[in-house]
């Protein structure tokens, strides 16, 4: 005969369930049980243990854009504008300052007589992308064909056709951007910060503790619950967060990391910027394992766990080893465990 008692057992990360503790001389002895009990089937499934942190919906951090064109600012973009390659970012002396893509700033005038350099390649790459070629494959050598392409581009933008792009004639950023804040004012002198920009797609910024760092690697998938709707996302980058200045005197600030997440479908949510969201990172996962509800586990008095298998009118205990706990289910294995078994479980 099997004696049973309730005991609380901690299972998995942050989980605790009430298990029935049974005492048996043999793990296969038939327990005394009610005629009818709730049962569940042993099924093969994927399990994922996830950790939740809070975050904010938005476009990510701002980057200041410095204007280097001397003169009077006569035109500015509006907050929310998305600017692509070739578009005017702002105007100085009633002439546009267009956007080029690149990784280095302009550090000299580039025109006839310019020596070889990466800035020449950058200019040729942008000219070709905008439809002004004739110089072959973009390279670091400035030629007459490069000057002719610049002149054609200058004519199309109503700029002086001198074949030279000087410092400040273009704005260079790595990609298209969204205007988040306009800093300069009409009538102000150029050569100062013009605006602050963000990426063009909305995403999520969340903060994690140092011990959670391994669960938020660039490229890893996450789920984001925003406004009652769950969408998927991808970790873009993880950076060290600014120290918390609210720490008690003499106390070392806790190390934290900012996690930038891109939404797989940016249009999948209409929640306003700044909305609080719940982000779930996968800590551990298992694919194609046998699982049962956690409530089906029986804690054996002699140690270990068992399942109570229902076989027609009879019941028997089979020993099991437990694996990953997640979402109310547990991975189980053992010589007698197979898919399709029906086991007694709690409601």
Image (tube, rainbow, N blue to C red):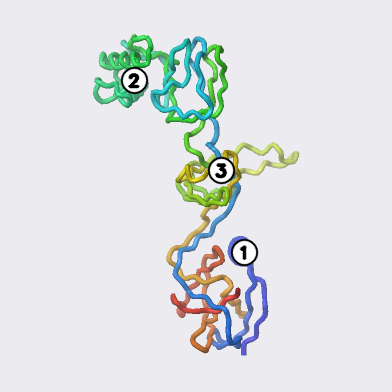
339 horizontally vs 57: left or right = left
Q: Residue at x 53, y 43 (%)?
A: 270
Q: Earlier in the sequence, mark 3 or mark 2?
A: 2
Q: Residue at x 55, y 50 (%)?
A: 225
3 and 2 marks in contact (CB < 8 Å)? no
**In terms of secondary structure, where does tag 2 sit?**
helix
2 and 1 marks in contact (CB < 8 Å)? no
Give the spatial CA distance, label 2 vs label 1.
60 Å
Q: Residues within 10 Å of mark 3 (few under 14, many from 20)?
A: some
Work out which quarter of the rendered image holds the N terminus and state it: bottom right
Snapshot quadrant of residue 2: bottom right
3 and 1 marks in contact (CB < 8 Å)? no
- Using the image, tell me which numbered label, if any, was put on residue 175: none
Give the spatial CA distance, label 3 vs label 2.
44 Å
Q: Earlier in the sequence, mark 2 or mark 1?
A: 1
**In terms of secondary structure, where does tag 1 sit?**
loop
Of 156 and 121, nearer the camera is 156
Residue 67 seen: yes
Judge whether 137 appears above or below 317 on screen.
Answer: above
Q: Which residue is mark 2?
A: 120
Q: Which residue is mark 3?
A: 271
Of 252 and 19, nearer the camera is 19
331 horizontally vs 20: left or right = left
Q: Earlier in the sequence, mark 3 or mark 1?
A: 1
Residue 38 horizontal/vertical position (percent): 57, 78
Residue 187 horizontal/vertical position (percent): 55, 12
Residue 142 horizontal/vertical position (percent): 29, 16
Q: Which residue is mark 1?
A: 15
Judge whether 326 appears above or below 158 on screen.
Answer: below
């Amino acid at each position: 005969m099997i004696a049973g008692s309730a005991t609380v057992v901690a299972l998995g990360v942050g989980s605790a369930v009430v298990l029935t503790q049974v005492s048996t001389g043999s793990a296969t002895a038939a327990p005394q049980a009610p005629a009818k009990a709730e049962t569940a089937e042993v099924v093969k499934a994927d399990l994922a243990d996830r950790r939740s942190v809070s975050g904010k919906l938005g476009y990510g951090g701002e980057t200041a854009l410095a204007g280097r064109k001397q003169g009077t600012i006569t035109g500015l973009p509006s907050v929310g504008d998305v600017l692509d390659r070739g578009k005017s970012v702002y105007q100085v002396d009633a002439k546009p300052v267009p956007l080029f893509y690149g990784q280095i700033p302009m550090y000299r005038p580039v025109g006839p007589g310019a020596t070889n350099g990466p800035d020449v390649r950058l200019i040729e790459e942008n000219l070709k992308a905008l439809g002004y070629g004739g110089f072959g494959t973009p390279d670091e050598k400035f030629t007459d064909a490069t000057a002719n392409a610049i002149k054609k581009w200058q004519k199309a933008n109503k700029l002086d056709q001198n074949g030279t792009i000087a410092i400040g004639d273009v704005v260079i950023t790595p990609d298209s951007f969204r205007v988040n804040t306009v800093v300069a004012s009409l009538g102000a002198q150029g050569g100062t910060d013009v605006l602050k920009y963000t990426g063009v797609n909305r995403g999520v910024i969340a903060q994690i503790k140092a011990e959670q760092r391994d669960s938020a690697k660039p490229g890893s998938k996450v789920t984001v619950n925003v406004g009652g709707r769950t969408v998927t996302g991808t970790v873009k980058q993880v950076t060290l967060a600014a120290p918390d200045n609210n720490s008690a005197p003499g106390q070392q600030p806790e190390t934290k990391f900012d996690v930038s997440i891109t939404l797989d479908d940016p249009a999948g949510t209409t929640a306003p910027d700044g909305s609080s969201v719940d982000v779930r990172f996968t800590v551990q996962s298992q694919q194609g394992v046998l699982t049962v509800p956690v409530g089906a586990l029986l804690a054996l008095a002699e140690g270990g766990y068992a399942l109570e298998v229902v076989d027609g009118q009879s019941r028997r205990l089979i020993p099991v080893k437990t694996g990953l706990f997640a979402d109310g289910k547990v991975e189980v294995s053992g010589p007698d465990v197979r898919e399709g078994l029906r086991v007694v479980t709690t409601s």
